[in-house]
Amino acid sequence: MRRAAFIGNLASCALAAACASRASAGAYTVTRSDADWRKLLGPDRYEILRQGGTEPPFSSPLIGEKRAGLYRCAGCDLALFSSKNKYDSGDGWPSFWDVLPGAIAKQSDYQLAEERTEVHCRRCGGHLGHLFDDGPAPTYLRYCIDGLALRFVAGAT
Ligand SMILES: [Zn+2]
């Protein structure tokens, strides 16, 4: 099912300029073979980061994480989010109203009937979650991120 949807995406991408970034995976500075990612990440993180999966809601221990620190990409260790921008959205996933400068890439996601904005790590291309426009001030954005895509490091923000 997932593979069929993915192939469908590729087919529609051939016609859509918005998908250009998906085709140019070489733009990421951290690249590995699929087998290497699988080995490095383990099955759960691999499913999220490399297959575009979504973890079950309210499953991540990071939802309740209140300490100061940085949320890093579980694939390449790039710092993505600061605890300063984290908030409790109640949506079931770790949520942030802003991202660290230059940390992510965005692209359209056509897996559901309604188009959503997918959020990827700028350095390794790992799929992190989605971006919505119903967050709190001052950005009014909600980065809805899979906890399995992140590694929290307590300390400096
Ligand atoms: Zn990364």
Image (tube, rainbow, N blue to C red):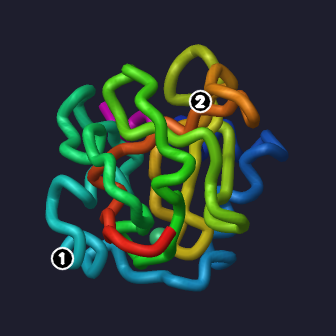
Give whichever of 51, 149 is nearer the camera: 149
Asked whether, in this view, residue 52 is left or right of residue 22, the answer is left
At mark 2, the secondary structure is: loop
Q: Name the residue under label 1.
A: 39
Image: magenta residue range: 1-5
Which label's residue is closer to the chain start, 1 or 2? 1
- What residue is at 69 percent from the left and 25 percent from the top? 133
Asked whether, in this view, residue 17 is left or right of residue 4, the answer is right
- What residue is at 19 percent from the left and 44 percent from the top? 61
Q: Residues within 10 Å of mark 1 (few under 14, many from 20)?
A: few
Q: Mark 2 points at which residue?
A: 110
- Decide: is 135 above or below 97: above
- What residue is at 41 percent from the left and 30 percent from the top? 88
Ligand 1 near label 1 (Cβ, under 8 Å)? no
Q: In which quarter of the image is residue 149?
A: bottom left
Under mark 1, the amino acid is: Lys
Under mark 2, the amino acid is: Tyr
Tell me, yes or no, if residue 6 can be seen here. no
Q: How crowded is mark 2: few (under 14 residues within 10 Å), some or many (20 or more)?
A: some
Measured as percent of width and height from the top left, residue 36 is found at 27, 81
The alpha-carbon separation of the residues under discs 1 and 2 comes to: 28 Å
Measured as percent of width and height from the top left, residue 60 is found at 22, 41
Measured as percent of width and height from the top left, residue 10 is found at 59, 46
